[in-house]
Image: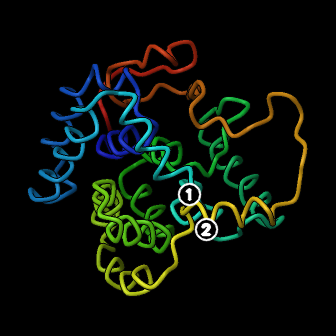
Amino acid sequence: MQILKVISHLLDYPSEGVRANQGELALAISNATEVSPDMRSQLLETLKGIYRQDLMDAQEQYSGLFDHGRALSLHLFEHVHGESRDRGQAMVDLLRVYEKQGFVLDQHELPDYIPLFLEFLSWLEPLDAREWLADMSHILALLAARLAERGSPYACLFAALLMICGRQDLIEEHRAAAAQEARDDTPEALDREWEEAAVTFSPPGDCDSKRTARHAPVQQAQPLHWVDPASAATNQIGGQAQ
């Protein structure tokens, strides 16, 4: 399902590779029958909005939105398990699903990173992809509601995912709660979290690398044609979308 590949790119850290291939992404959006004409227009505007500005500005805005606080974390299981041990087991289980499908991750990738998860779904049969999205629909709706509350254009990406799986109605269920939530990305909130966080140490190089080289599926696949130069060594992209 090519539209999932497009949304995966738009939800990932802004890159020169995507900027250079906006035309192909725009064409894929325009041809996406899985979403309504109005949603296609919103997705096209989001694509233009991210990349019409200087790339460093786009990256700064992205980091300010998704990297400060946990409310908008792009890691699925953080919204379910927080930092508990259950999150680790959930990621192991998801990693096994990837491996069973012949989907190989870079050694530092976290399997619950949403752009990565969407790229995996884009390789599946449409019905299977929709079922996976439906299983995650409450998390997607919560993120859509929080982003809409902050007036972010990224909200439409999650709304599109919910439309694809037929659960767009869930957004309204979360809007009231999102409006009442205290922001966790303010300097005061971040300072409190820093003071309360336990000090932990990780092996050298062991970090969340959502912006490092991407993964290389073992099987032949059918996503978009272009390859981001920053990840050409590990990413194999060619053919047409499912």
Residue under pointer 2: 79
Residue 20 - label = none
Q: Position of residue 153 (x, y in %)?
A: 28, 55
Image: 93 above or below 86: above
Residue 73 - label = 1
Task: Tell me how far mark 2 sits from mark 1, CA to CA.
Answer: 8 Å
Q: Nearer the viewer, residue 39 or 224?
A: 39
Rendered residue at 30%/40% (across/down): 2
Amino acid carrying label 2: it is His
Amino acid carrying label 1: it is Ser
* Left or right: where 68 falls relative to 205: left
* In this view, the mark in front (2 or 1): 1
Work out whether mark 2 precedes mark 1 in sequence or the reverse, and give the earlier one: 1
Rendered residue at 31%/58% (across/down): 152
Neighbor class of circle 1 (other Cα within 10 Å; few <14, some 14-19, many 20+) is some
Q: Secondary structure at mark 1?
A: loop
Extreme-front residue of the structure: 188
Name the quadrant containing residue 143. bottom left
Image: 131 above or below 142: above
Q: Position of residue 86 (x, y in %)?
A: 79, 67
Mark 2 and mark 1 residues within 8 Å of each other at the beta carbon: yes
Rendered residue at 44%/38% (across/down): 60
Q: Position of residue 117 (x, y in %)?
A: 52, 48
Rendered residue at 34%/45% (across/down): 7
Image: 40 above or below 224: below
Number of numbered tags placed on the structure image: 2
Q: Quadrant of the N terminus?
A: top left
Neighbor class of circle 2 (other Cα within 10 Å; few <14, some 14-19, many 20+) is some
Image: 219 above or below 68: above
